[in-house]
Image (spheres, rainbow, N blue to C red):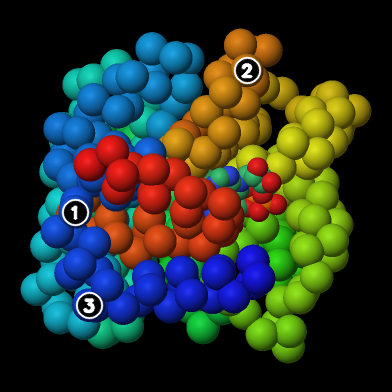
Amino acid sequence: MEQVMRNTLLWLSRNRRAERWARRFGFRLGAGRFVPGESLEDAVRAVEQLHRRGLAATLDHLGEFVDRADEARQAADFCVRTLERFADLPYDVYLSVKLTQLGLDIDEDLCMENMRKIVARARDTGRFVRIDMEDYAHNEVTLAIYRKLHAEFGTEHIGTVIQAYLYKSADDIRALAPLKPNLRLVKGAYKEPPSVAYPEKRDVDENYKRIIDLQLQSGGKTAIATHDEAIIRWAKERVRELHVPDERWEFQMLYGIRPQLQEALAREGYKVRIYVPFGEDWYGYFMRRLAERPANVGFVLKSLVKA
Ligand SMILES: Cc1cc2nc3c(=O)[nH]c(=O)nc-3n(C[C@H](O)[C@H](O)[C@H](O)COP(=O)(O)OP(=O)(O)OC[C@H]3O[C@@H](n4cnc5c(N)ncnc54)[C@H](O)[C@@H]3O)c2cc1C
């Protein structure tokens, strides 16, 4: 039953008519739980509130897949404006970007040009940019672009993501280790076939521990991005055993998911960074969060009753 619900929600996340319908209700559907707002100023407010709760942030300007060069350039310009808006604010915040939003499927050179512009601005304002990892079809090219940008800007300004559900990820971490990379480690969010990804959750969880272990010992920086309490407990222990210095690792979670756990970890003294998506294209992101945990649909129904 849960699987049927999940597939239906994922199908709805890509359905234009459902999107038009949902947008009429806007944030009254409850999207505000996962997305603090549509504008850059909404994002500034959210980062400030997180800061007051002892939490750092990474910003993601939500966007649909783009297929025109001018749209990709506009997306890059918005990233630059975001970095500039935060330049003089005293918050621990950086940027997360998706390469398909910056023109990867149109022309790799255009995407590189956009990324150079963004990372150069990040370097000039003392910030960091992380390339989110998308589906398997974009995995190799994302790693190749990451390597090029790393050669130009260094570990301080560019990082990427490795997904535990892919069979290849432990090898990728070993191959990247000489760069002492800054990597966010996640379980993986896309629907991938068993030819490339572990179909069973327990295998994903095992591989997640394996790649955390490898990356913690790489000499780079590690962001452990999960809401899974068993993994979080295990990671705390492993970090202690390996004597990993505080500045070389952190926990990360999504805005609106397990907020009490986020604060509890921060109170215990751990660095916790929250991924803050914002922008007008909230519909697809919102539906994917519901699909991850169909029980969340209950609160959407409650929001509708209250609206
Ligand atoms: C900061 C951050 C950045 C990410 N970046 C990427 C990326 O670049 N590429 C990528 O493929 N994936 C990314 N992800 C998503 C990730 O791959 C997982 O899909 C997602 O984090 C859910 O897995 P989990 O590790 O929390 O564990 P799970 O085993 O899925 O969940 C553990 C527990 O977390 C809670 N939980 C999880 N999801 C929800 C939800 N939607 N609503 C309510 N509770 C929930 C539940 O209590 C659940 O039992 C990112 C995740 C985070 C936290």
Residue 166's quadrant in the figure?
Answer: bottom right
Q: Mark 2, residues whose alpha carbon is within 10 Å: few (<14), some, or many (≥20)? A: few
Q: Amino acid at mark 3?
A: Arg
Which of the labelled discs sits on residue 17, or is there none? 3
Q: Nearer the viewer, residue 71 or 109?
A: 71
The first of marks 3 and 1 along the sequence is: 3
Q: Residue at x 82, y 50 (%)?
A: 209
Q: Amino acid at mark 2?
A: Ala
Left-right relation of 108 to 135: left
Give x and y (percent) for residue 158: 44, 49
Residue contact between numbered discs 2 and 3, judged by CB atoms under 8 Å: no
Q: Which residue is mark 2?
A: 264
Which of the labelled discs sits on residue 168, or is there none? none
Q: Is residue 123 visible?
A: no
Q: Is the CB atom of the residue marked by disc 1 within 8 angstroms of ligand 1's nearest atom? A: no
Q: Which residue is mark 1?
A: 25
Vertical side of 115 occupied by 30: above or below: above
The first of marks 2 and 3 along the sequence is: 3
Quadrant assignment for the N terminus: bottom right
Q: Residue at x 51, y 83 (%)?
A: 137
Vertical side of 95 occupied by 15: above or below: below
Q: Is residue 66 visible?
A: yes
Q: Residue at x 74, y 84 (%)?
A: 194
Of labels 1 and 2, the one closer to you: 1
Give x and y (percent) for residue 278: 27, 46
